[in-house]
Image (cartoon, rainbow, N blue to C red):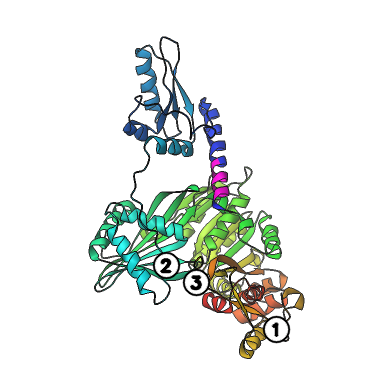
Amino acid sequence: MDEQKIQQRRRDEEERATAKRADILGLVYLDTREFEDIFPLVRGVFSNEQMYAAKLAPLQAGNIEQNQPWRVMITSQTPRSVIQKLKQSYADEGKQIDFYLISEFAWKKIMRRYNPPKEIIYDDIEIANEGDSETLAQVSQTLENVAPDKIFDYLIDQADRLGASDIHIENQRNSIRIRMRVDGALHPVAELSRDRYRVIMSELSSRAGVSSASQTSQSGHIQKDIYNENGSHLLNLRVETVPTMYGMDAVLRLFNFDESMLNLDLLGISPKERAEIDEVVSHPRGMVLMVGPTGSGKSTTLYSMLNALNTPDRKIVTLEDPIEYGIAGISQIPIDTTHGASFADGLRSVLRLDPDVIMVGEIRDTDTARTAIQASITGHLVLSSFHANSTAAAFSRMIDMIGHNPIFSSAIRLLIAQRLVRRLDDNKQEYIPSEAMKQWIRDNMEGVSREKLPQDISGDFKLWRPAPSGDSPFGYKGRIVLMEQMVVDENIQSFLRGERGTISAEAIEAQAREDGMLTLIQQGIIMALKGETTIEEINRVI
């Protein structure tokens, strides 16, 4: 889905929510979309400072002689005390004032007409190829020239434009290195002076609530509205800092907050995998576990499942450390594990709230695992993440944590191991792999039926490699989901019941493969045979 459609959907949802709020509050709802860009601005009623402070804007100036009321647009954030004060002051002057409820999106757009940004346009950041010192120097110079009060916002805006998932700010002996992770790969962006670093860290400390002088690692959170030619979106930034030899390093993780993006249909899941997910989450109880390293898209997949389950007849509660996406209609509870809180204690409290669906951010210990499984067999659907490299490794570790337990054997219903791999740009190059590569592929695909393969691998077959271009400097564009899904059937349950002599990740995987599961490496090879990615990329992430 392109950015314009995403913004359209977001606006539609906000307008519908505002209309409902107007009905509840007994106010007149006003949809401004047809005239917000063209209606004559009314000057002299309120100052810009007043409009920003109270989140309101004038719609029409009245006239006492002609019995015309003053019309004012307000938002759900406009204080009731301000509304009452305006009513009283206008009544004292013999004036009539009418209020219309508009969305915050509409108010922001109108305010950009009242107070348009007066920004200096700096050159866009370009990511340097390996060994491209010229681009690195050019970007570094641009960042050195950006005004001190703009550099932090400029860096975030540019990271968002590039589709970066992380910004790394790293202290070195004589300079500060800025790197960005784009499509899963970390790229150098600039080398900055320490003066620039102090400006950036000062702004970071102020907004995220962390101390640049701290001798311990810290966590923080920032929200920022991003405006561009396609509209606007809310960016969530999770901030992590750690003291190093030369100063405080920071990593900013970017989350594009848009509920319309949390959609299983947008993840590129195969029909078979989607059917397995739909079948499991359609049941009122059971457990779904997501496994994979940091940055593998686990949270996005879990939130997309929650969004699909988010209906008026279900109560959904999440326990998160930290909360990465806010979703309307879901009760989300932050668990601050740095100050002694635990997922297990939070989960026991949540069970008293009569939830239908529970999402536990991460299962980290035996207590949380047992409590989550107990919840899943007593009428709750439990979604969670777990630290493991594969579904078989996760199931084996879970057995180690909870032991052999026939009661728990039917609790875990689906395990998903996930990675994100870079997608090849359309400008890719075809080639015939070496004999060693062909044999490696055949060895890994042993036992996979011919019908599941996009090409016949018994003889010569094709692969593709990236072809860098001006539009795609690395030959990749975007990322695609790579999933290994283990449906916990009777054969897999037998391991948890203690009916198998050998319990290991290898034995569990062998049984799952016999039952039809494709491993991560097999799924990756299939994608490479389709020309969607490369074998090198598969080996990089698995």
Whether tag 2 and tag 3 are in contact, CB under 8 A, the answer is yes
Whether tag 3 and tag 1 are in contact, CB under 8 A, the answer is no
What amino acid is found at the position of numbered circle 3 in the picture? Phe
The CA distance from mark 3 to mark 1 is 32 Å
Assign a secondary structure to mark 1: loop
- Asked if residue 140 lies in the magenta stretch, the reply is no
Looking at the image, which residue is at 41% across and 21% down? 61
Left or right of 177, for residue 379: right
Q: Position of residue 386 (x, y in %)?
A: 53, 67
Q: Residue furthest front?
A: 470
Instruction: Categorize mark 1 by other alpha carbons within 10 Å: few (<14), some (14-19), many (20+).
Output: few
The CA distance from mark 2 to mark 1 is 40 Å
Assign a secondary structure to mark 2: loop
Residue beneath label 3, please? 474
Asked if 287 appears above or below 461 in the picture, the reply is: above
Instruction: Categorize mark 3 by other alpha carbons within 10 Å: few (<14), some (14-19), many (20+).
Output: some
Looking at the image, which residue is at 42% across and 17% down? 62
Instruction: Categorize mark 2 by other alpha carbons within 10 Å: few (<14), some (14-19), many (20+).
Output: many
Looking at the image, which residue is at 57% across and 60% down? 301
Say which mark, if any, is on residue 240. none
Q: Magenta residues?
A: 4-11
245 and 93: which is toward the camera:
93
Residue beneath label 2, please? 127
Asked if 161 appears above or below 17 in the picture, the reply is: below
Asked if 38 appears above or below 278 in the picture, the reply is: above
Residue beneath label 1, please? 446
Assign a secondary structure to mark 3: loop
